[in-house]
Image: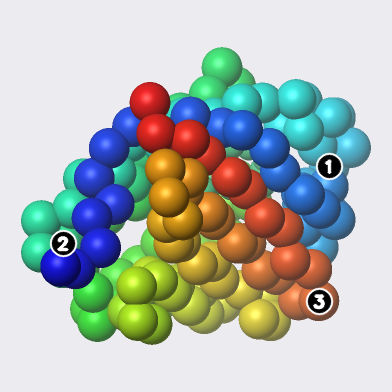
Amino acid sequence: MPVDFNGTWNFVRSENFESYMLALGIDFATRKIANLLKPQKVIKQEGDSFSISTTSTFRNYFVQFKIGEEFDEDNKGLDNRKCTSVVTWDNDKIVCVQNGEKRNRGWTHWIEGDELYLELCCEDQISRQVFKRG
Ligand code: 1AG
């Protein structure tokens, strides 16, 4: 059975998010607010087609992609830098490479039990977020 990311996922905890935002050049005030958020993710998956909507009381972010197909990402409301992104399978993980101005930028999602993990990378920083099925 292939992994099924479909569902509503509620924020539980994060690690090193401040350093990840610093690596992206996010300003002080925005970081202070962003650090307090408990975002919710709604993931829709149909085969290799995904949409991921991340919502919070401050900003929302929506991305959709098909595994293996490059797409233009604008990171609107985040750092607003444009990337050429592509998501691939690594066993049961989905791995996004975000090619652009920032070195080593991307993220990985995977599921462990009823938890969704998100690892965010930028330059030398890795932040991890954990969500629980709603
Ligand atoms: C995301 O990407 C994007 C949403 O999950 C949050 C993750 C990282 C935030 C990125 C940069 C920080 C920039 C600005 C901080 C301001 C607001 C934070 C808003 C958080 C809620 C939207 C992975 C996703 C796949 O595409 O799950």
Q: Which residue is mark 1?
A: 27
Distance between the Cα atoms at labels 1 and 3? Answer: 18 Å
Q: Secondary structure at mark 2?
A: strand
Q: Is residue 66 left or right of residue 80?
A: left
Give neighbour class at mark 2: few <14, some 14-19, many 20+ (Cα, 10 Å).
few
Sequence-wise, the earlier of marks 1 and 2 is 1
* Mark 1 sits near ligand 1, with its Cβ under 8 Å away: no
State the image coordinates of residue 5 (x, y, percent, origin top left).
29, 52
Q: Quadrant of ligand 1?
A: top right
Is residue 49 placed above or below 42 in the rendered structure? below
Kindly identify the residue that appears in the image at 74 percent across and 66 percent down: 126
| Amino acid under disc 2 | Ser
| Amino acid under disc 1 | Asp
Q: Is residue 112 left or right of residue 100?
A: left
Q: Secondary structure at mark 3?
A: loop
- Write down the quadrant of residue 43 in the picture: top left
State the image coordinates of residue 16 (x, y, percent, origin top left).
81, 53
Q: Which residue is mark 2?
A: 49
Distance between the Cα atoms at labels 2 and 3? Answer: 30 Å
Is residue 16 placed above or below 69 in the rendered structure? above
Q: Which residue is mark 3?
A: 124
Kindly identify the residue that appears in the image at 66 percent across and 68 percent down: 121
Kindly identify the residue that appears in the image at 75 percent across and 25 percent down: 36
Observer able to see residue 7: yes
User: Quarter of the image containing the N terminus?
Assistant: bottom left
Question: Foreground residue, 73 or 89?
Answer: 89
Q: What number is the disc on residue 102?
A: none
